[in-house]
Image (cartoon, helix red, strand yellow):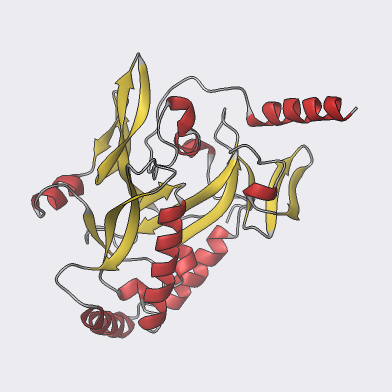
C-alpha cells in the first residue's frame, strides 16, 4: 500500500441536491429540492446522469426526494467522515483538517499536528475559510456491492443529522448498520439565516412502508446469511480503518475543482446556507488562500505596530 495515500471506498457515482446553471456567461451552482444521481464523467461541462437516476424517478411519484440505501460498514464513522476543513481555493488541495481538538496542517516543512480550536476560535481559518465538510458513502442498487455513491456536504444540518442517525441505527440494531435497509430523505426547514426561505438537508430513515422493528429483523437475517457465506464484516471495517488512516488527507487533487465549488459558493452568488452536494465547474477563483491569510496577517501586524 502506498504510504501517504488515503485509501477510500470505491465510488461509482455522485449524489447531488443542486445543479449547474449559466448566468452572465458563468457556470454557477444553484440549489434544488430533489436528489440527482450522476456518474463521475462530464460531457460538455455537464455531469452525465447515472442510469439509476431514471430508474429511481420511475419508481416514485413527483420529485426524487428519497433514495433506498445500504451501507458498506458497521462503524458509523466509516460511512460518514466529517471534519473541519480548510482548502486552497486555487487547487482545491486540503490545507488544514481537524476535529475540534487536533488538526493536521500542511506547511512548508510538511504536515504538522496542531491544536484545533474549531473555526470560530481559529485565526488560520477565520472568515469562512474553514468549514465542516462531510462525505457520506452509500450503496444503491445491487449491481456493485462494493461500489458506492458519494454525497459531499458542508451543511451543519446534514452532517449533524446523518451522524446522529447513523450512530442511533447502529446502536439499536446491535451493530448491524451495514445490513439495515434504510433510505436517504431530503427534508426542508426555514431558519433566520435563510431569511425564513426553505433550505434542504439530508436525513436518514427506515424505508417507507416499513418499521424499525421490521428493518432490524431483516438486518439480522441478512447478517446470518452473510456469515454463513463467509462474509467477514469486521475484517472489512478493519481494512477501511487502515485505508483511511494511510494518508494525511482524504481528498485528492482530482477532486479539487469540486471542493472549491462546495466550499466557496458565496463567490458564485449561491446561498451559503444551502446544503451543497455541488457539481464541479470551471470559473475564475480568487487568489490562493495562503496568500490572503498572509496579507491579512501582515495588515494586522502593521496595525499592532
Q: Which of 210 and 1 is in front in this view?
A: 210
x, y percent for residue 163: 44, 64
In this picture, is 130 found above or below 236? Answer: above
In this picture, is 304 found above or below 10? Answer: above
Residue drawn 55% across the image and 45% down it: 131
Residue 79 visible:
no
267 left or right, relative to 119: left
x, y percent for residue 102: 70, 58
- Residue at the outermost top position: 25
Residue drawn 56% across the image and 64% down it: 242
Position of the C terminus, as image quadrant, is top right
Residue drawn 42% across the image and 54% down it: 157
Position of the N terminus, as image quadrant, is bottom right
Q: Quadrant of residue 292?
A: top right
Q: In which quarter of the image is residue 139?
A: bottom left
Residue drawn 8% across the image and 52% down it: 61
Amino acid at each position: 500500500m502506498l504510504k501517504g495515500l488515503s485509501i477510500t471506498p470505491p465510488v461509482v457515482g455522485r449524489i447531488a441536491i443542486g445543479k449547474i446553471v449559466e448566468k452572465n456567461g458563468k457556470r454557477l451552482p444553484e440549489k434544488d429540492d430533489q436528489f440527482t444521481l450522476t456518474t463521475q464523467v462530464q460531457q460538455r461541462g455537464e455531469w452525465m446522469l447515472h442510469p439509476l437516476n431514471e430508474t429511481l424517478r420511475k419508481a416514485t411519484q413527483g420529485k426524487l426526494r428519497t433514495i433506498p440505501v445500504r451501507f458498506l460498514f458497521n462503524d458509523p464513522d466509516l460511512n460518514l467522515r466529517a471534519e473541519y476543513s480548510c482548502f486552497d481555493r486555487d487547487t482545491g488541495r486540503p490545507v488544514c483538517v481537524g476535529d475540534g481538538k487536533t488538526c493536521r496542517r500542511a506547511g512548508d516543512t510538511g504536515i504538522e499536528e496542531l491544536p484545533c480550536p474549531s473555526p470560530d476560535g481559529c485565526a488560520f481559518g477565520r472568515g469562512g475559510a474553514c468549514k465542516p465538510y462531510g462525505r457520506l458513502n452509500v450503496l444503491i442498487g445491487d449491481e456493485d456491492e462494493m461500489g458506492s455513491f458519494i454525497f459531499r456536504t458542508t451543511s451543519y444540518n446534514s452532517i449533524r443529522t446523518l451522524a446522529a442517525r447513523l450512530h442511533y441505527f447502529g446502536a439499536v440494531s446491535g451493530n448491524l448498520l451495514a445490513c439495515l435497509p434504510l433510505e436517504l430523505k431530503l427534508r426542508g426547514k426555514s431558519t433566520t439565516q435563510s431569511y425564513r426561505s426553505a433550505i434542504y438537508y439530508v436525513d436518514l430513515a427506515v424505508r417507507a412502508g416499513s418499521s424499525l422493528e421490521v428493518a432490524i429483523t431483516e438486518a439480522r437475517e441478512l447478517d446470518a446469511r452473510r456469515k454463513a457465506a463467509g462474509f467477514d464484516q469486521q475484517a472489512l471495517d478493519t481494512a477501511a480503518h487502515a485505508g483511511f488512516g494511510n494518508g494525511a488527507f482524504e481528498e485528492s487533487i482530482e477532486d479539487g475543482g469540486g471542493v472549491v465549488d462546495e466550499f466557496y459558493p458565496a463567490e458564485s452568488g449561491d446561498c451559503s446556507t444551502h446544503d451543497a452536494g455541488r457539481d464541479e465547474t470551471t470559473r475564475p477563483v480568487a487568489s490562493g488562500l495562503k496568500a490572503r491569510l498572509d496579507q491579512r496577517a501582515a495588515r494586522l501586524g502593521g496595525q499592532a505596530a
